[in-house]
Image: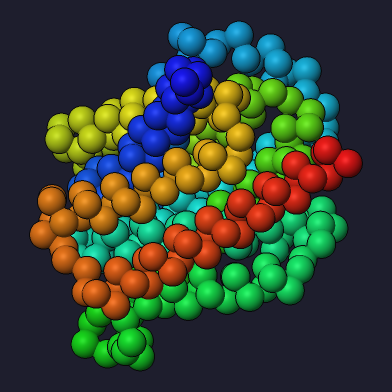
Amino acid sequence: MRDPKIVASAGAICVAAALWGLDGVVLTPRLSGIPVLFVVFLIHAVPFLVMQPILFSTWRELAVMDRKSWWALVVVSATGGLVGTIAIVKALFLVQFDMLSVVVVLQKLQPVFAIALAAVLLKEKITGKFLVKATIALGGGYLLTFGINAPRVAGGSNLVLAAALALLAAACFGAATTLSKMLIGGVDVRTATFGRYGVTAGLALITCLAGGVGLPFEGVSQTQWFIIIIIGMTSGTTALVLYYWGLQRIRASVATICELCLPLSAIILDYVVNGTVLRPIQWFGAAVLVGAIMSITLAKNGQKQSTETA
């Protein structure tokens, strides 16, 4: 009989991934009337405020962090928090309610960028098998986005730019994943998460003020405030708590499979909420992309376990 704790942990990660899919397809696109920079500020500032009653003691841990950990936290927040979120929010706004699932699923290319950047920053070895699988994953992403057709820039279509921004977001999130390894070496996960939301909110605030966007609170409707609060309570704090709680009890390779609930939920929600139906070639591309990412991540975890065993 399977350990109930293992089952519960896997279920927690599945729920967290589904919440991220809900955010990308259903919630964030409803904020399209708000400036992108201000949206990024709000979706980090609100969860950070929500965390205060629970994680207020974490301020003391941040105060005693060394300089190296602080620099890592700032860089992680700038890449994965600020630039990556700006890119994905802008991509979702560009496509509105047309092919939202394509943009969300393209984020699953994150491990490709994370492993490639780990080779540059952490001097980890890149194998020929990885390059082949990464190429297959990129090919799957292309089929998912464009099918067998060449990208069409004419006609006012924003899909090409949205796809490029989704890839930029995946690269930023991948960079943040790699750099987080350096950060976690000095602080625990709770402190890193709390600090990342706080620093990202601060960076987004500075960017809003310096970029001339300001803080247009009056332009946010009651419905949009409700959505922002839902994002903060679901895909923000709740999803992260569930994800890290589950990750403490199961192997990373199992967690990777559970995270496939993100693209699955994105495609299902895009169909149910927006009526988007993927063509057969796009389904094939999604399967190729997800399969290649699974293979890359499982192989990477297998190498880690072999190294640890040795």
Q: Position of residue 244 (x, y in %)?
A: 54, 27
Q: Is residue 171 left or right of residue 220?
A: right
Q: Position of residue 217 (x, y in %)?
A: 28, 36
Q: Position of residue 197 (x, y in %)?
A: 53, 32
Q: Is residue 76 left or right of residue 164?
A: right
Q: Position of residue 25 (x, y in %)?
A: 26, 51
Asked which colour scheme the image uses, the reply is: rainbow
Residue 46 vertical placement versus 3 (above, below): below
Quadrant of res 65: top right
The structure residue drawn at horizontal position 57% and vertical position 59%, both measured from the top left corner, is 295
Quadrant of res 290: bottom left
The structure residue drawn at horizontal position 76% and vertical position 68%, both measured from the top left corner, is 127
The structure residue drawn at horizontal position 24% and vertical position 65%, both measured from the top left corner, is 99
Residue 100 vertical placement versus 272 (above, below): below
Compare residues 303 and 66 and report the one nearer the observer.
303
In this orientation, does residue 202 appear? no
The structure residue drawn at horizontal position 22% and vertical position 69%, both measured from the top left corner, is 278
